[in-house]
Amino acid sequence: MYDVKKMKQFDVPFTPMERLYTRLTLLIWGVLVIYIAMVWQKIPIEIPLHYNALGELDSTGSKWTMLTIPIVTYCFWSLMNFMMKHPEWGNYPARLNEQNAEAFYTHNRKLIVVLRNGGSLFFAFVLAEMVFVSLGIMASQGITTYATLLSIFVILPLAIGVVQSRKIQ
C-alpha cells in the first residue's frame, strides 16, 4: 500500500477544458445572481418550494429560502476545491503506488472539477427554476427534467470517471 504521508506533491496544471468549464459555470452563476438581484422586489413573498412526483405543488415558503441554494452551492464548491488540494485523501484502489500516484491524483482532480461544476450547474438550474416559476415566467419542469439534469451533470460523469480510473495501471 502506498504511504500517503510520504507522498510527493504533483503540480499538474489545469487543462484548457477544465478552465473553460469552470469559467462557464462561474459566469452562469454570476448572471443568475445579478438577475435575481434585479428582480428581487418582483418576487412574491411566498414562493413555490417543492413539487411532488406528479408535478403538483406541495410546499411553499419565504422567498428568502432561495438563498439557501447559493449557500449550499458555495459550501459544495469549497469542499470540492479542498478535495482537489488534498488528493491523497481520496478513496483509491489498493494498487495505488509511487509510479501511478500522479495518474490517480490527476484523474481524481479532473473528476472533481467535472462534478464540482456539474453539481453547481444543477443547483443553478434549481434556483433559476424557483425564480422563474415564482415570477410566472415558466411552469415547474418536474421530476423528469431534474433526473435528466442530475444524470447528465453528476451521475454520468461519475460513472465515466470510475470506468476510466480502472484503466490506470
Image (tube, grey):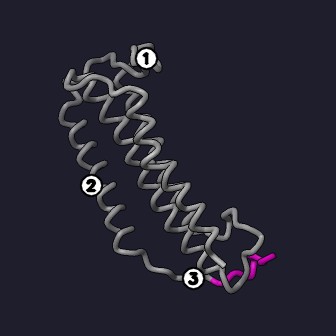
C-alpha separation, residue under disc 2 versus residue under disc 3 = 29 Å
Image quadrant holding the C terminus, namely bottom right
Q: Is residue 69 above or below residue 88?
A: above
Where residue 54 is drawn, which disc sits there? 1
Amino acid on which disc 3 is placed: Phe
Q: Secondary structure at mark 3?
A: loop
Q: Nearer the viewer, residue 19 or 5?
A: 19
Q: Secondary structure at mark 1?
A: loop
Instruction: Residue 163: give x, y in percent of width and height.
Output: 59, 63
Q: Secondary structure at mark 2?
A: helix
Main secondary structure of the magenta stretch: loop
**Residue 5 magenta-highlighted:** yes
Q: Quadrant of residue 54?
A: top left
Amino acid on which disc 2 is placed: Leu
- The number of numbered badges drawn on the structure is 3
Image quadrant holding the N terminus, namely bottom right
Q: Which residue is mark 3?
A: 10
**Magenta range:** 1-8
